[in-house]
Amino acid sequence: MHTADAVETIQREMTVFARRARAAAGRMHPELSLVSYTLLGHLEEVGGCRATDLATHYALDKSTVSRQVAALERAGLIERRPDTTDQRVQVLHLTRAGRHILAQVTESRRAAFRERLADWPAEDLSRFAEYLVRYNAWRGPGREE
């Protein structure tokens, strides 16, 4: 396969992957979109952060993050707390319900991946994992993550 053909195939298959991920997220927890799941996961990983930090990290518009944060707050999955170093700043944290739902959806996603990849040889799984890490680690122009 030529380089141009390979890049075209990768682009097409990544689009299919993203579409399936969005659809699967909706089936696993109807009220928790893929974006919401991702934001909850990040909040858990970093131990809380400001909404502006989320927008910067994911290169999203602040209004988009604001809408997502508002929906997660209404659902009782996150809460705002004053920053311990600057009381004027509000930091977003997972609530107990948020941690519970995140754990539930994460386990469902892992189970779905295990099922889908069950017949893959260990060598293929390792290679696929390494390629995904390498692809996602790239820091091109304009990428500040």
Image (cartoon, rainbow, N blue to C red):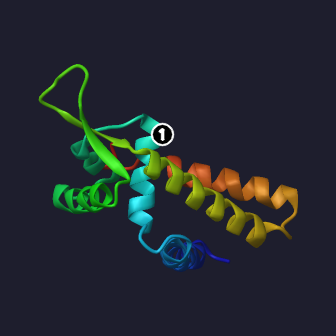
Q: Position of residue 101 (x, y in %)?
A: 51, 57
Q: Residue at x 22, y 62 (%)?
A: 67
Residue 9 shown left or right of residue 99 in the figure: right
Q: Position of residue 44 (x, y in %)?
A: 46, 42
- Front residue (pair 3, 94): 94
The residue tagged with tag 1: helix, strand or loop? helix
Question: Is 32 placed above or below 135 here?
Answer: below
Question: Is 78 placed above or below 37 here?
Answer: above
Q: Residue at x 57, y 52 (%)?
A: 103
Q: Residue at x 24, y 27 (%)?
A: 83
Q: Position of residue 105 (x, y in %)?
A: 56, 61
Is residue 41 something that shows in the picture?
A: no
Is residue 121 something that shows in the picture?
A: yes
Residue 67 shown left or right of residue 45 in the figure: left
| Amino acid at pointer 1 | Glu
Tag count: 1
Q: How crowded is the residue under tag 1: few (<14 C-alpha within 10 Å), some, or many (20+)?
A: few
Quarter of the image that includes the C terminus? top left
The residue tagged 1 is 45
* Res 127 quadrant in image: bottom right
